[in-house]
Amino acid sequence: MSTERILVTYLTQAKDLQKKAEGIAVGMTVGSWTDLPLAKQEQLRSYLGEVAHIAPLDVLETGETRGLITISYPSACFTPDIPSLLTGVFGKLSMDGKIKLLDISLPPAFLERFSGPKYGIHGVRERLGVFDRPLFMSIFKSCTGLSLEELEVQFRAQAEGGVDLIKDDEIFFQDDKAPFLTRIKRFKEIGEDVAQKTGKPVLYAANLTGPSTKLIDKAKQAIEAGASCLLFNGLVYGLDLLQQLAEDPDITVPIMAHPALAGAFYPSADYGIAAPLLLGTLQRLAGADLVLFPSPYGNVAMAQTDASQLVQQLISSSGSLKPSFPVPSAGIHPGMVPKLYQDFGLDQVINAGGGVHGHPKGAAAGGTAFLAAIEATLQGKKLSDTATEHEALRLALDKWGGHS
Ligand code: 1AE
């Protein structure tokens, strides 16, 4: 039996933090301790949680102390899957007053039991043949209710802008006017047609939706039909299903994790699961090759420190897990590219929907404007200087800002 320990950090408040921590360590593992007969205590000792660290932060008006507590759990208490981990370290505890799950640190032997992303940053770059700049992705918008032909027009316009990836909107479930597999086949043909002209491939992430028991088969059919990437709302379906998709040897395309529902977990200071853990550590552990998150400056902004820590969780070395591609999203327009590059560097996928389709000259010009902004930023040029010779970029900056 493994004697390795899993370290879990919480932010909480209590009259006596030490006592609260001891209650968690025992209550979340063997349940009760001193009441057990000695022989039972010996038998259960290797499953007993322990208080590893306590860091008081401040004393509140209520007289309670707010602080960080770290509990050390024996890894023998868990199986190598996210439902076991989350239930074991935060299941019932999540309902026990003001407590927020901040971090889970896994020992090497336990971490090795997860496969993580199949492709990761390098694998996605290899599929596109682009290694020296941030990638750019465009999102289908206003697509529900459109006919297949109308969607084809939208796909072509996005591809002609030279974008690297095109993804379905996560709220696109429609299957009557533009059936899933038909749509995938047509977009593959259009993508190949455009690639002959632009000289570069485009990946299409099809939104994997429907009853959870059918999703793995549906994913395989999508790949067979030509989907080059899958979009998956993993927090809604469960991270275990994401892990199963990622571990399946027949799922041979990158998986892109959407953060839908994440706002129900991370924004509170006192409750829930911290964004770097939820959208960083856990998504990567489950096997997401690309992870969307709200950038700190868009229309559903995440705190800058959370976003930076989240990205670190996705890209920093973590056993043998490949790094996942960070995808800052939501309300992104070309004028934000220098800030995105400054904050998240080369290995990111800049992602926009409204910032592409809302371009005064249409979606193709929208993609072109983004790529010009990326190139200018990499060359250390001001966007406003490049814009004097690049009409699509100038029009985007005129509309959304970013000339300075
Ligand atoms: C954080 C997810 C963002 C997303 O999925 C989405 O559709 C963004 O759209 P825009 O770029 O804000 O229009």
Image (tube, rainbow, N blue to C red):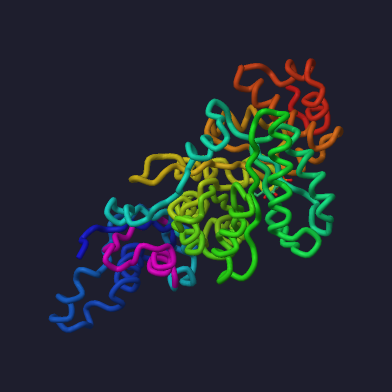
| The quarter of the displayed image where residue 357 is located | top right
Q: Residue furthest right?
A: 360
Residue under the point 77% across and 34% down: 366
Question: Which residue occupies the foreground of this view, 35 or 346?
Answer: 346
Whether residue 331 is visible, yes or no, is no
281 or 141: which is nearer to us?
141
Horizontal relation, residue 380 to residue 67: left or right: right
Asked if residue 118 lies left or right of residue 148, the reply is left
Residue 288 sits above or below residue 121 on the image: below
Q: Residue at x 43, y 62 (%)?
A: 82
Asked whether residue 55 is drawn in magenta, I would say no
Which quadrant does the C terminus fall into?
top right
Direction from residue 187 to residue 246 in the image, left or right: left
Up-down relation of residue 93 to residue 307 (above or below): below
Is 349 located above or below residue 151 in the figure? above
Observer-nearest residue: 217 or 347?
217
* Residue 102 location (% of width, % of height): 44, 55
Q: Could you say which quadrant of the image residue 265 lies in? A: bottom right
Q: Nearer the viewer, residue 159 or 239?
A: 159
Residue 133, x across and y down, in percent: 57, 27
On the question of residue 377 being in view, the answer is yes
Residue found at x 52% / y 41%: 325
Residue 76 falls within the magenta-colored stretch:
yes
Q: Quadrant of the N terminus?
A: bottom left
Which region of the structure is painted magenta? 67-91
